[in-house]
Image (cartoon, rainbow, N blue to C red):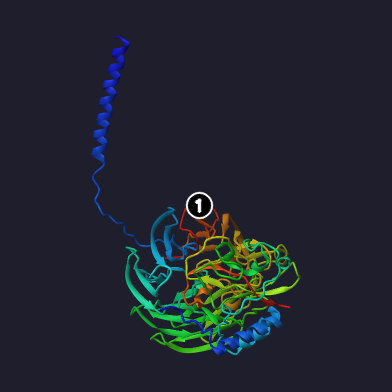
Amino acid sequence: MTPRVPDIGSPIDALVERMARDLARRVSRRSFLGNVGALLFSTGVPLLPVARGASPTPARPDAAADSGDPQTCEYWRHCAIDGFLCACCGGSTHSCPPGTEASAVTWVGTCHNPADGHDYIVSYNDCCGKSQCGRCLCNRNEGDKPLYMPFKSNDYNWCAGSKVGIAYHCSTARLVGVAK
Amino acid sequence: MHAPNIRRLVGVLLAGAFASLGQVASAQLPAEPAGAVEQLNQPSPHWVWVNDMAFFAFPDGKAFLVDGDSGRMLGMLSTGFSFTAVVPPRGGGVIYAPETYFSRGTRGTRTDVVTVYDAVQLQPVAEIEIPPKRASLMPTPGAQALTDDDRFLLIYNFTPSQSVTVVDMRARKFVGEIETAGCALVYPTGPRSFFSICGDGALLETTLTDEGTLAGHERTAELIDVLKDPLSEKGVRRGDTWLFASFEGVLHPLRATGAGVEAQPTWPLFTPQELAQHWRTGGLQHLAVHEGSGRLFAIVHQGGPETRKELGQQVWVYDLSSHRRVQIIKTRNKVGSIQVSQDSQPLLFACSLESNRLDIYDATSGKYLRTVEPLGLTPTVLVLP
């Protein structure tokens, strides 16, 4: 028996996903946490996982606007990543290596792109179903929060939300949108 | 006598001497029994469990038992996938370990169990199947705990829905699952109560019935300012009070009373000058407390505002009554996890994820005593037997 996962193809999840993505584009991390987070938590509303794994891949920025080496920990998108970089494991910043499954839910960070001066919301989807890739281990913690704030915490194994279970392979750093 | 004759004589004498030695030596080494297996003695207060999540090989979690006095490894448990730590009951005799397995190593059917190990033979003697929901995370002491009477084992679940599995360790039976939506981890406050920390900074207090089912939930006010200065979740307990350090180095005592958990006055771990020098607490298990002396041990380092996971090379010791720092222990190596034995001549154990070694200090004088290495792959949480 594998962990229950959200049916990311359902209309409800599609709606939640669209709302979350719209919200993420419009508001900064701090105000998102301050307003929406406080509202949800203070009212005791159970937090529904935000399905990000199956959302369409954003258009890739041109090379000049996305400078840096995705195989290094210093690469700008990795500001809150914790794990093995999928770009070193047969995947890329936004794709999983062959034969693995992208986690449907994950944590997000906000990273500053020095090339274009924008802050981007970055979704750190884990790739799951195989043992650790073991290459390019990277732990950076900009904006990372404790385990009691799950969707800002990189200390969880986010393969918990995948169909194949918690076998963790590597982490991507997928752009979701501009934060401001 | 001619020289050749002397050489011949010496040769004969030496050959005879070695032959005699050989006979004596063989007589002193008796044959040894085949198939001998060691058993453990009664636990010493200076034993420690070094839990290893095997970060580079998740299916192969381990727990090493080490004697701090001799530096000997005494034995090991093989504890499965994404392992957090063993949970020794106060009563001794057995050791509990929440564990996860896949039928094909890294795939197939997932099975979660609480394995009960005999504490003398380190052999599994019972296995209690629980829902396959145990949180897979960077090990932290709050991921699992026994109630104060050892009756119920509480295990934090993350699927990513949040809940707590309750296991009756007396009946060795899974009791049920308690929803803790929006709230994480387990911090026991009595034989039938524990709290979890919620994302808005409130605490969710859970009370159990004598059967281990949910008796009630109470939600406190927002005791933690999660936006300005969140608490690290890596709290330690002294008596009825849990102690948590905030990101900015403020100690928050949370005291369990008959009326629920109350926030006690906070106090700073660092002076304004030390804060200006960027001293912070950091590490996977950055606090330890010695119950008898009321001393708090904290791993510290100098770093920026988001360096709470960085290792430190100093342990600052505080008196919990006066709130004063009373000692600085400079460690030989960078450390992220510490534990202190609870006897009157305590040892300080120190390790880190980044090196497979355990360093041992005299917790009173701070003197370095010894190192046990290599030890596992990625040691995480230190647990006293």
Which residue, as the protein is rendered here, is positioned at the far right? A117
Q: Position of residue B283 (x, y in %)?
A: 58, 65
Q: Depth check: give the residue in front, A172 or B181.
A: A172
Location of the N terminus of chain A by quadrant is bottom left
| Image vertical order of residue A26 relative to residue A167, above or below | below
**Rendered residue at 48%/75% (across/down):** B135
Q: In this view, does B210 lie to the left or right of B330?
A: left
| Image vertical order of residue B70 relative to residue B287, above or below | above
**Rendered residue at 46%/58% (across/down):** B376
| Image vertical order of residue A160 relative to residue A140, above or below | below
Number of disc labels: 1
**Rendered residue at 42%/60% (across/down):** B64
Q: Is mark 1 on a helix, strand or loop?
A: strand
Q: Depth check: give the residue in front, A148 or B106.
A: B106
Q: Where is residue A93 in the image (x, y as percent from the top left)?
A: 61, 68
| Residue B238 visible in rendering | no
Q: Depth check: give the residue in front, A167 or B4.
A: A167
Q: Where is residue B48 in the image (x, y as percent from the top left)?
A: 44, 62
Callout 1 amino acid: Leu
Location of the C terminus of chain A by quadrant is bottom right
Q: In this view, does B106 lie to the left or right of A113?
A: left
* Image mark 1: chain: B
**Rendered residue at 28%/13% (across/down):** B5
Q: How crowded is mark 1: few (under 14 residues within 10 Å), some or many (20 or more)?
A: some
Q: Position of residue A103 (x, y in %)?
A: 53, 75
Q: Residue B168's quadrant in the figure?
A: bottom left
Name the residue that disc number 1 marks. Answer: B369
| Residue B190 visible in rendering | yes
| Image vertical order of residue B184 relative to residue B44, above or below | below
Q: Residue B80's quadrant in the figure?
A: bottom left
Q: Residue B319's quadrant in the figure?
A: bottom right
